[in-house]
Image (cartoon, rainbow, N blue to C red):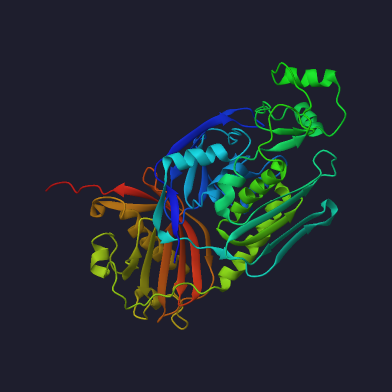
Amino acid sequence: MNIKQRTIKAPVSVSGAGLHTGEKVTMTFNPAPENHGYKFRRVDIEGQPIIDADVDNVTDTSRGTTISQNGASVSTIEHVLAALVGLEIDNVLIDMDGPETPIMDGSSIQFIDALQEIGLIDQEADREYYHIPYNIHYTEPERKVEMVAMPLDDYRFTCMVDYNSQVLGSQHASISSITEFKKEIASCRTFCFLHELEMLLKHDLIKGGDLNNAIVVVDKDVDDEELAHLAKLFNRKDIKVAPQGILNNIELRHQNEPARHKLLDMIGDLALVGVPLRGHIMAARPGHAANVAFAKKIKTLIKKERSRKHFKVYDPNMTPVYDTVQIMNILPHRQPMLMIDKILELSKSHVVGLKNVTMNEDVFMGHFPGTPLFPGVLQIEAMAQTGGILVLNTVPDPENYITLFLKIENARFKDKVVPGDTLIFHCNLLAPIRRGIAQMKGIGMVGERVVVEAELMAQIVRKQKSPEA
């Protein structure tokens, strides 16, 4: 049985201070279309740049995971992403009016509660998992970090931490299925050692820390004067060392809460692979840098496999959604600039178009007549027209609008296209259409070969009416 992709029923917001910046931020989870994934949008910055939750966008892992794209950054994202993975949500656009996610109580549980309260909804598209095909290893011998992903038809985690600390000692945490995340892992809070806390305070970090959102492990002798100083910094009457060897600011929710929180961090960081995983992840002494490096290794393997994987091959004779005449009722193009013959599939977020390349096209009279090749610029034009159908499908009277393409990026031509070829174009929205602006990723294929790909940006513009006679 195929499992459907999932988003949320309506927008929902949470607010709080960032752990390190101390800045108050409001974070709004928005429903997103199929195949959208996780994206952050900085609504406090001009142009509202979008940052994909992608391991290739990670720019810092020193005290949390930071991603950057389009001139903007979002930090401490791991607890938010862990909540989304834990609820098996696939598509969300996350608006933020600041640079760092709110720390809340130091765990994922308040994000979980907000998302469940607003409700989840299944979408039409099937969820596509990446099944770990064989054991994938990652090690950092100098830090004694070891990670392995093993084949399994579920998402299971086992985590061990060992900080050479008499207080913390060795701890293990595990879940046998991601469905256990909410109950067993989501409420487990971040932790740090007392010597780290002092260093962070000295460097003007953890401005949002108030000792309500972190477990502080006392790993050194501490006198009353130092405890009094900490109490003053965090506006508390009294701070003591609890019998478990932690500050008495909070009570542990689980005896092995630090190990469970490391597991939470790992789930959030591995979400940056960009696709739901099926496998058993085992890790010893994980941290953000190692998690990200491991995620990059898994993503590299996925990209290699996808480059070899057979894409869906369409039957050119299948009944189209639109034939040529119907396309001309939507697009203003005409021969010789009408580049699309059929639309084979169309949804709110993707479109598949077809072009038959024939020798009697005008272009071949001047473009290498002895060795005819269909020009790359016209391949992009055909891709743009296919995307135009997708964009115009979002307005009620498409015949009264046109699409103007604003930008073409990352265009790559991977193989030649010759007369007799049938070009199939796939265009998918990269983000919801906003203020008439659409961003798309397009791929052109001949059979099972990818011959062209590009990212396109277009604007919907109303046609100017002709003056009356």
At horizontal 67% and vertical 49% (from top left) the residue drawn is 263
Vertical comparison of 42 with 333: above or below:
above
Closer to the camera in the image, 419 or 148? 148
Closer to the camera in the image, 79 or 374? 79
The residue sitting at the right extreme is 221
Residue 402 visible from this viewpoint: yes
Closer to the camera in the image, 186 or 422? 186
Q: Is residue 328 left or right of residue 355?
A: left
At horizontal 41% and vertical 73% (from top left) the residue drawn is 423
Which quarter of the rendering shows the N terminus? bottom left
At horizontal 48% and vertical 72% (from top left) the residue drawn is 311
Q: Is residue 329 left or right of residue 7?
A: left
Closer to the camera in the image, 100 or 14? 14
Q: Position of residue 393 (x, y in %)?
A: 30, 55
The residue sitting at the bottom extreme is 370
Q: Is residue 463 left or right of residue 75?
A: left
Q: Position of residue 43 (x, y in %)?
A: 49, 36
At horizontal 84% and vertical 41% (from top left) the residue drawn is 165
Q: Is residue 355 left or right of residue 309?
A: left
Vertical comparison of 199 with 166: above or below:
above
Q: Position of residue 69 (x, y in %)?
A: 58, 46
Q: Position of residue 53 (x, y in %)?
A: 57, 49
Vertical comparison of 309 with 240: above or below:
below
